[in-house]
Amino acid sequence: MLLTNVGVTSLLLISTAAGFMDLVYRRVPNTLLVVGLLLQAMLVATLPEVALGTPLAPTVVYAVLGLALGLCAFFPLWRLGVMGAGDVKFMAVLGFALGPKGLLVTWLVGTALAAIPAVSSVLLTRAASSAAVAWVSVHMSGITRPIWQVFAPARSWLASRRGTRQGAPYATYLAIGAFAWVLVLSRQ
């Protein structure tokens, strides 16, 4: 039981760190991913029975299959410029740790979460051109501007950390998906 908790805890810590780094810096460091992969590989290789009955990959074959699926399925998205290389490598690490089923669920949850701000942004951009939104923005600016200014220091701090990196923090959404799989969905 203790070793099972070590495997799950290490995965959740690596996922948290990757999600935080992507959110703040818009990059997922290779060092972090290598450490995560090595931790999970040591657990699976030395104590394969630890993962049985847990949300982790139960065998070396299952883990390698998850890793290959993570790389092969998402590498083309990186080549097309749709996904960052760190996101692809993070998917491979998650695939190794969770296996194909856990990777699929993590991807579905992460993508659904990533779609929320993307769709909201498109809808708000389209709605911003309407007369009703223009009226509300003029008449409500006295209320919304002070609220928005509360977040100005945080926005400024984040912008200084990111530099010129753009894009969605997809690893952050994937980390939440991994949490959902490990803590909730795999137990049903």
Image (cartoon, rainbow, N blue to C red):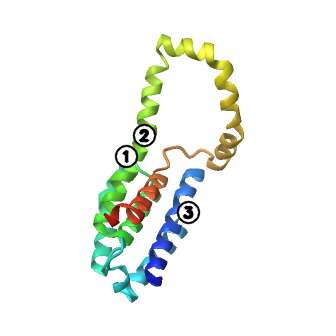
> On the image, which quarter does residue 31 sit in?
bottom right
Q: Which residue is mark 1?
A: 112
Disc 3 vs disc 2: which is toward the camera?
2
User: In the rendered image, which residue does mark 2 sit on?
Assistant: 116
Instruction: Choose between 182 and 63: the one closer to the eye.
Output: 182
Label at residue 156: none
What kind of residue is marked 3? Ala
Residue 126 position in % (x across, y down):
43, 22
SS at badge 2: helix
Q: Which residue is mark 3?
A: 17
CA separation in Å, label 3 and label 1? 21 Å
| Front one among 125 and 8 | 8
Q: Could you classify mark 1 by the number of other residues whose Cα lies within 10 Å: few (under 14), some (14-19), or many (20 or more)?
A: some
Q: Disc 1, disc 2: CB below 8 Å?
A: yes
Q: Amino acid at mark 2?
A: Ile
Q: Is residue 36 visible?
A: no
Q: Position of residue 188 (x, y in %)?
A: 31, 63
